[in-house]
Image (spheres, rainbow, N blue to C red):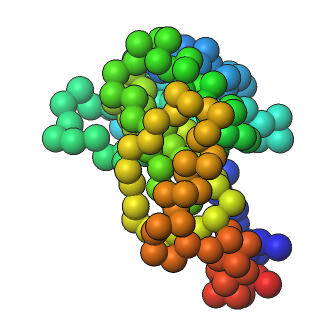
Amino acid sequence: MTRPGFRFSHFGMFVNDIPKLEDFYVRLLDFTVTDRGQLPGPHGPMDLVFLSRDPDEHHQLVLISGRPKELAFNPINQVSLKADSLATLCAMYRMLIAERLPDIAPVTHGNAVSVYVPDPEGNRLELYFDLPWYVSQPMRVPVDLDDEATLMQRLEAHARTLPGFRPRSEWRAEMARRMGVE
């Protein structure tokens, strides 16, 4: 059961180079362009590209032209995509390495394993897989994804040393009670 009323659906971000970002999200992350067009904006026409990985969602990501060239910092902390398996995450990590992308950072948060990588405009992406246990947050340490055969054992051994370690099902039951959606 979920909270009634709303569920998260999509995210839009202003970009400088729509073709470059479109290529990145389509080619590497397997998004599909579902629509594209133009709308009037406060500083002239804005180009929009709608992307999705889910046929039930018209768009999960919208790329919109008009990002200022000069920003004091990137206001997007991260855009996160959840992997369906640890093997999928490791395969994507190898693909990102093969693409020679900068600043690829595999980490464990104790309750998830993540690969952080910037997209071509420096927006931080988190590609992650939830682990079957919970640990108190925040927690982040680098992890070696190269030895996939022992990865799950290494992740669990590390997580067991951290505060709050317990099965994810126990944590979920507590959150459902706190959210009133038991």
- Position of residue 177 relative to residue 43, above or below, is below
- Quadrant that contains the N terminus: bottom right
Residue at horizontal 38 percent and vertical 43 percent from the top = 142
Q: Nearer the viewer, residue 26 or 13?
A: 26
Please say if 86 is above or below 159: above
Position of residue 55 in the picture relative to residue 154 (left or right): right
Residue 85 position in % (x across, y down):
72, 40
Front position in the image: 102 or 154: 154
Q: Is residue 37 left or right of residue 45?
A: right
User: Is 49 rendered above or below residue 98?
Assistant: below
Residue occupying the point 55% across, 51% down: 155
x and y percentages locating residue 93 in the rendered image: 54, 26
* Residue 80 lies in quadrant: top right
Q: Give how far across and how far down residue 101 sits, in percent.
A: 40, 18
Q: Is residue 81 visible?
A: no
Q: In the rendered picture of this protein, how many numbered marks are placed on residues?
A: 0
Q: In the picture provided, is 111 more to the left or to the right than 107?
A: right
Residue at 56%, 17% in the rendered image: 95
Residue at figure coordinates x 59%, y 56% from the top left: 156
Q: Give the image quarter of residue 131.
A: bottom right
Quarter in which the C terminus is drawn? bottom right
Spot occupied by residue 92 in the image (x, y as percentages of width and height) = 59, 26
| Residue situated in front as seen by the camera: 83 or 52 | 83
The part of the image, by quadrant, that contains residue 134 is: bottom right
Is residue 25 toward the left or the right of residue 68 in the image?
right
Query: Is residue 27 visible to the viewer in this orientation of the structure?
Result: yes
Front position in the image: 36 or 152 = 152
